[in-house]
Amino acid sequence: MWINLSLILGGTLVGLLVFEIAARPLNLVFDSAHASKELLSSPTGRQEYQKDPELGYIPKMGPQYKYSTWGAKHNQHPREKRPGWLRVLFLGDSITDIGYTQDSLEKLCQDRPIEFWNCGVGGYSTFQELKYFQRYCSQAEPDLLVLNFYLNDFDGSPVVLKDEDDDFVFVTPYLGQEHFHPWWFKNSAVYRLFLSLKIMFSGRIGLTQDMKKSLQEFTAAAEREGFRFKVVVYPWLDRFDRWPAKHRQQYLDIIALLQELEIQHFNLKPFLESRLNNHPPEWTRVSNEDFVHPSREFCEQIARYLLAEGLLEDPGS
């Protein structure tokens, strides 16, 4: 029996070793993470973004690019803060990057001494937005930091791999930072296969804890640096009973976290439902099949709603 067990164990180890040697050059990800290479491999992506070991990728910055060295899109506002002016900085993913809500807010507030700074980067999670703010955007010294949160922002810390074409691949594991080892994830195909099997039975464990830590770091930075921190929660653009189960849970999780941490937030799901009483769901989207990005017309109404609800007001004044 022991000889047979030894042979089985030895054969298994040899098989795993052969698999590792054969698969390692391909950097296969399996089902343990989301992988994307467009931003780092396409001609446009290479012109506008670059690899970053901590964030996966960052936009290229400088006068010749869309982003300044402070991590914000270029605007007409001076870098030096003006007395009596409110500096509002928006963080987020592609919803923020597109900027429809911020554009509407700026038009509605054009006669008020308010600056709007757009630091949105397409595809970023809250973890990346936090680190991006700490590294670059905090230099703008905002009076108000608004985090535009979308449901898939629960995705965690990224890892950068190379694929078989020697292109960089940006990978986001489906596990919290304490539930996988970045070095092993980056260097072992067998380990990534093991994580895929683990996720099959355990789900995306640890991501909610990671989100809580990121939000706590934002609030700590706000207290330390003297700015106000608020969150706008963007919904899946359809009636709630038609939301994917994953997004329904993510919505419940983020609202519970914001309430637990006592972070002032603006939940756009009820506002969406009120608009759907008079408009079809397609009206809220930039395109019929895009359930993520709100249309310009809907963002105009979102901006009016946020102003009416006190987005720019200081609750302590």
Image (cartoon, rainbow, N blue to C red):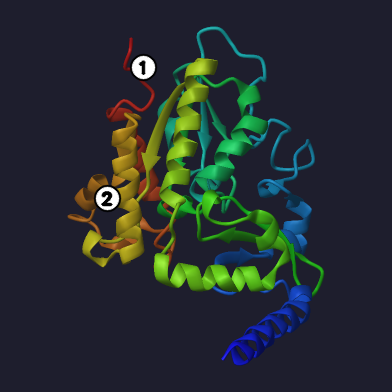
In percent of width and height, residue 46 lies at: 77, 57
Q: Nearer the viewer, residue 245 or 309?
A: 245
Q: Report the disc number at residue 130.
A: none
Mark 2 is on which residue type? Leu
Callout in the foreground (1, 2): 1
In percent of width and height, residue 130 lies at: 56, 37
Q: Nearer the viewer, residue 156 or 198?
A: 198
Decide if residue 237 is in sight here: no
Whichever of callouts 1 and 2 sits on the residue coming sooner in the sequence is: 2
The residue at the far front in this view is: 2
Left or right of 149, for residue 57? right
Image vertical order of residue 187 relative to residue 63, above or below: below
Q: Which residue is mark 2?
A: 272
The residue at the far left in this view is: 277
**At x 23% / y 46%, what residue is drawn?**
270
**At x 47% / y 38%, what residue is drawn?**
213
Q: Which residue is mark 1?
A: 314
Q: Element at badge 2?
A: helix
* Alpha-carbon span between mark 1 and mark 2: 25 Å
Left or right of 242, for residue 41? right
Mark 1 is on which residue type? Asp
Image quadrant where residue 78 sits: top right
In percent of width and height, residue 16 lies at: 68, 80
